[in-house]
Amino acid sequence: MTSNIRFMSGDLIDSDIRVAKTLPSKYYTDEKRFRKILKSFKRTWQFVGLSDQFTSAITPIDHIGRLLNEPMVRVQDGESTHMLSNVCTHRGMVLCHEHSDAKTMQCPYHGRTFNRDGTMKHMPGFEEVVDFPSEDDHLASFDIRTWNGFEFTSLKPEVDVEDVFRPIQERLGWFFSDLKYDSERDRNWDIDANWMLYVDNYLEGFHIPYVHPELNEALDKDGYTTECFEHGVLQVGMAKEGDVCFELPESSVDSGKNIAAYYWWFFPNLMINVYPWGISVNVVVPNGCDSTTVLFRSYVKHPELLEQGAGAELDKVELQDQFVVENCMKGLRSSSYKRGRYSAKHELGVHHFHRMISKLG
């Protein structure tokens, strides 16, 4: 399946990868451009977590606040799940700082109290205030959608969740069951580089033989493929003979293949890595033009396979990637580098990503 996106001629990134040049270095180094591109995140679905991983009724979702500049709190109110503003409507204080099973949420600044559905319940010292409370005194609520047990939120979604994830649903929907969140495998990696460099690196397997010797041993380099979709990219890594691979159902389009891993990226900052042992999710959080945090979250299906094949030694793979990404950032600041060229064979995903980014400014 190929991308449904249509581009006009004369684009910054030529639609023909054979003649196209990569994004100019200023896309990675210019602060104003960084802020402009970051605004696009508000229109996309952002990963919250697996519904079953939330054991408290009230859970601040810190990375969403950093991604969207909009602090949010996930609240379980009986059978209903709400994604609410985590900002007190009195003076803008961040409301919830810890997980809680409290019946209400009370601001630690002046004591304004909210019900779990976001409505204001009580505010001391406001007895003489006219027309109080009003609708503006309740907490704002945001869209929250569930796909295969995973929750997503957005400020102004442009497309439906099902449309974004349709390619992975059609390919691997059968795999998304019996997943267990493993908090001991959580990692937060800080990287001194622009977030797009991390995505660039993720979207090609070209570097694997040079950067990841252990991963290279688990993959058949001749079977590595890339497919581009409207909202993302899929890379498929084939297992070498005798190594761990998926037990694919006969109904799968990949039935009969020895697949070691499916690497899915969804615009702009979500990676869903599907291994025989389960799923590793990477959420890329831009902190600044040259600072990024990557959140790793693991959802295990077959724990006996955790240390085998392409899905093993993920910490080592991450550190190897950080080395090249941080050094690319240093190089992009150089006055001698402006932009490069794509490998028409290996960098289809990077080219697709750059085409999407170039439309944002």
Image (cartoon, rainbow, N blue to C red):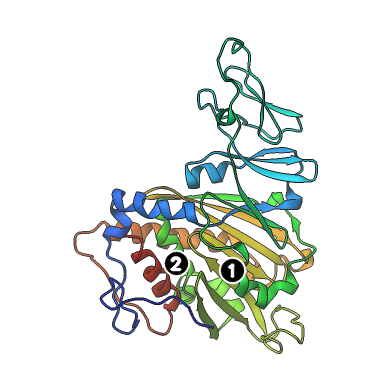
Can residue 193 be seen by looking at this rendering? no
Q: Position of residue 38 (x, y in %)?
A: 41, 52
View extreme (bottom): residue: 256
Left-right relation of 353 to 91: left
Left-right relation of 21 to 349: left
Can residue 50 be seen by looking at this rendering? yes
Residue at horizontal 76 percent and vertical 80 percent from the top: 247
Report helix, strand or loop for mark 1: helix
Residue 62 occupies which quadrant of the picture? top right
Residue type at the position of mark 1: Asp
Residue type at the position of mark 2: Asn
Q: Total marks drawn?
A: 2
View extreme (front): residue: 131
Instruction: Report the disc number at residue 201.
Output: 2
Disc 2 packing (10 Å; few <14; some 14–19; many ≥20): many
- In depth, the one of 82 and 298 nearer the eye is 82
Q: Is residue 240 above or below residue 33?
A: below
**Which sits earlier in the primary sequence, circle 2 or circle 1?**
1
Instruction: Report the disc number at residue 163.
Output: 1
Residue 165 occupies which quadrant of the picture? bottom right
